[in-house]
Image: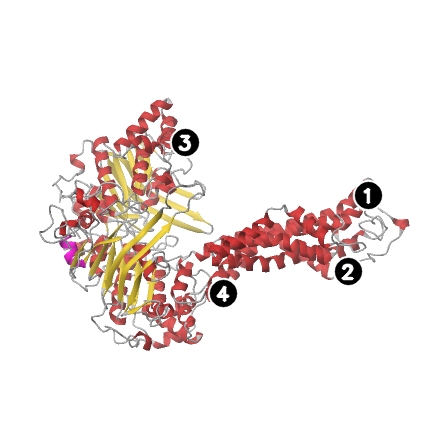
Amino acid sequence: MSAISPSVAPAINVNPERSPGYWSNVVKRLRRDPMAMTAAAIILLMILVAVFANWIMPSDPFQAGMLRRLRPIGTPNYPLGTDELGRDMLSRLMLGARLSLFMGITPVIAAFVFGSAIGIIAGYAGGWINTSIMRTVDVFYAFPSVLLAIALSGTLGAGIFNALLSLTIVFIPQIARVAESVTTQVRRSDYVDAARASGAKPFTIVRAHVLPNALGPIFVYATSLISVSMILASGLSFLGLGVRPPEPEWGLMLNTLRTAIYTQPWIAALPGAMIFITSISFNLLSDGLRTAMEVKE
Amino acid sequence: MDSSVISRPRPPSSHIDIGGPQQALLSVRGLIKHFPLSRSMFARGPATAVRAVDGVDFDIRKGETLGVVGESGCGKSTTARLVMQLTMQDKGELVFDGQTVGSRALPLRDFRRQTQMVFQDSYSSLNPRMTIEDSIAFAPSVHGVPHKQAIVKARSLLDRVGLSPVRFAGRYPHELSGGQRQRVNIARALALEPRLVILDEAVSALDKSVEAQVLNLLLDLKEEFGLTYMFISHDLHVVRYVSQRVLVMYLGEVVEIGDVNEVFDNPRHPYTQALLRSMPSMDPNRRTEEPPLSGDPPNPINPPSGCRFHTRCPHAQPVCSQTPPPLSDETGHAVRCLMYQPGSGHSAAPMGVAA
Amino acid sequence: MSVIDMPVHTPDTVADSTPFLSIRDLHVRFSAGRKTIDALNGVDLHVARGETVALIGESGSGKSVTLRTLMRLHPPRRTTVSGRIEVGGRDVLAMSPKELAAFRGPVVSMVFQEPLLALDPVYTLGQQIEEMLRRHEPLSRDQARARALALFERVRIPSPERRLDAYPHEMSGGMRQRAMIALALACRPQILLADEPTTALDATVQIQILLLLRELQHELGLSIVFVTHDIGAAAEIADRVAVMYGGRIVEQGTMSQLLTAPRHPYTIALLKSRAHGAMEPGQRLETIAGSPPDLSALPPGCSFAPRCPLAIEACHAAVPPLTPLGNGQTARCIRLDQTASHTQGFVHAARP
């Protein structure tokens, strides 16, 4: 018995049953993960607070008042107390979310773009191109990230833009390494060989075959860097290298509230708590994403 | 043949038969491929390499199935990749229908349209993020076929290999079974309407009952589309069943080549004899008593001197370790062994002047 | 050609004919997330001392699951096992972890398909064998090493002294498999379970390993349960064969019986779908329509019925009972009267 099925011309034109794509399956699995969903909710909350801070702040975050310095939590009109210059903590924390999140996410996005490009090119090209690119990347990778961030920031000078730039440079090597490794793996698979055998040019192969398979894992790795980025940005601000006063930013607030540890420790800890909650949420979401992407039906 | 099958596709004008029926479709001449081994900076002596393919010559005739057999380290997979030009040879050339591959007359891209491959691992040969029809349509669209048309072609090929387009075109590889995926791979290989298809252990990983279905399909497609096959397999029964001629490889060389029934019924090379005797006897009353060959297939890093098989050959004589035998040039049944080389110095060789 | 006529081993000619290994009505079920997979659905198998039984089937038939259940290798949380397994009179399913540890190695041991995956890559072969020996017997290191050396010699590994200090990745495929057999035989087990041990090997090496197993079995009086999808390999080594499909044994008998007079439609179809030398050029292979059953949604009745050319309504209704066919051959089918004429058999010319 042969396996021929008599072909019927109309069968060619019927719309085939479509399976849900890869990403919609990932989202479906993610929705079933309570940890990841909680983390996503918290992040969403933070983002909303950051975006709508101007409208939901109870008081003016820049309004100082030396007479009401370091009021404790629960003071009427100042639910989370006041900082060392008498400004409302709650409002400053809300507005601070904007810069903190911005400085956490932006360098990672930029590094994702540049790092992936470098890594994918190195991974696909192989040979001496790979060696020259990756060894250069390794030089940067060899520096501890905090040290590198501080050194770059210090050289470039303080300020938000410079901090973003130095953080981006810190993350590019890390993402490039992951990108190169993933791309090398993909490049060795039979379907890439089949694509080469069909006469496709390297650019087409990268676009059609390498990118869809490599970007996913690189993306997951990148999301795990967001929390690191937030902490590094806060650290830079803490050291005076990032955001400058009076802009509210959680790391900067930690710095300026240092002396208040002895008198109002809870208030001094608040910005740290915010950093902690947000970066843990990003981590959990990233973990959940990785798990959701790993499972093969 | 089913008359309701879509009419036999006319090969595109670039696929016309140039050399005529007597011209071999593919001529492989002097292929050599060594993979250098990385060594520490402090190593002394000459660099070693894995001599995967070390001087291989054969022809594939139009419309035939050439079976290729051999064990680990013989170089058959590397040969397949060289024929596909997925790996570039160190030396040697490929001549396709009389034209040298890579020359002005036949640029690589045009060669690629006419030669395709079906891989062993059905899962890793399909992009997990592409739907089945997109995977099949990829090759034609690379060569300029508009996307809509490529999709129609993909669906008709799916139908041709026995997978209903309605059910399968929009699916992803992980949703299909091994046998179904291999059918998709076959459809994908046919999308460019090639003349030569290389099947590298294409049915080895499938269950026996599925293997039978896929083999039948391959035979039907060969007839319908006028294909030529190079069929690599370790399963000698299957090779005998599908091939007209068979090529036996050992340690990077061709040791015997000829009509499949000739070679299987009257194997000349001692290795071929041992290989055939290693097949389980299928008769519980007459079981094999002695393994025909002892030891493991050797490593192609440092092949033995002279005839590469002499270390395991029951008929080896001192001359075998000194003189590498050439492949005899009978067109019907050629063998690379001093016993068949007139005047070679081996006691079993016929009299005559050394070639 | 050096093929000598050998007497076929039937259970009667073996010294002890009471079954040493006895499996009765074995059911194994895996829970994977929301699905349950009925891997084994009533397996009955008996193996006498010194007998080799081959379990033949395709993927999903349950042959590997049977072996692993014999040694209780499945994760207990997700596996439900019912039925009875007896080895030498002892109930395997009721064993405590301590008893199991003493059971695996000295009584039953296993040889896997891919030695590179089954052997620990960071220890030498010698170390692995010595560890196994000293776990079960009070031996000094020198004594253990001497035993390991003797084992390597017995499995015909050349330069055994040197090879004891080799790592798995330093050996070739055939030698690794011999080393794994040596490891499995270290504690002198009475039953050897072999899960496709030659599938990944070249033909010339496969025949060596099959012959080695046969030789060792004669010498040591081992019982072997040999899982494979290759009927040829089974023919070289097995006294009896059990064909599995959909988690059940559908036919059992001696090797000759199954090759000359198969009775179950699946066995017949399986044998017919093999390419063999006696075929005409261009002749198409006979195929089995359809695809293997979904073990998470098994149909009631005979699991082969959806694909069987002889199936009638009664086949879909209830699982066929085991029908004895004489001389120890049995089959699970209610249509056996239709298959009695397939006696042309499948013992073809010995070579391809």
Q: Nearer the viewer, mark 1 or mark 3?
A: 1
User: Which amino acid, mark 2?
Assistant: Ile
- Same chain check for tags 4 and 1: yes
Q: Residue at x 46, y 55 (%)?
A: A127
Q: Measure how far apart labels 4 and 1 are at the Cα level.
A: 55 Å
Mark with earlier residue (4, 1)? 4
Give the alpha-carbon distance from disc 1 to disc 3, as whole Å.
62 Å
Quarter assignment of residue B262: bottom left
Q: Select label 3 or label 2 by which is in front.
A: 2
Q: Nearer the viewer, mark 3 or mark 4?
A: 4
Query: Are dots 3 and 4 on a single chain?
Result: no
Whether discs 1 and 2 lie on one chain: the answer is yes
Q: Residues within 10 Å of mark 4 (few under 14, many from 20)?
A: few
Pick out the residue farthest to the right.
A67
Name the residue tied to disc 3.
C96
Q: Position of residue B92 (x, y in %)?
A: 30, 60
Where is mark 1, residue-wise?
Answer: A260
Highlighted range, magenta: B258-267
Q: Is residue C326 left or right of residue B12?
A: left
**What SS does tag 4 mark?**
helix
Q: How many marks?
A: 4
Identify residue for label 4.
A207
Q: Is residue B261 magenta?
A: yes
Q: Residue A201: image x %, image y %?
A: 44, 67
The amino acid on which the numbered mark 4 sits, given as a three-letter code, is: Arg
Residue A41 visible: no
Disc with the residue nearer the chain's start (1 vs 2) = 2
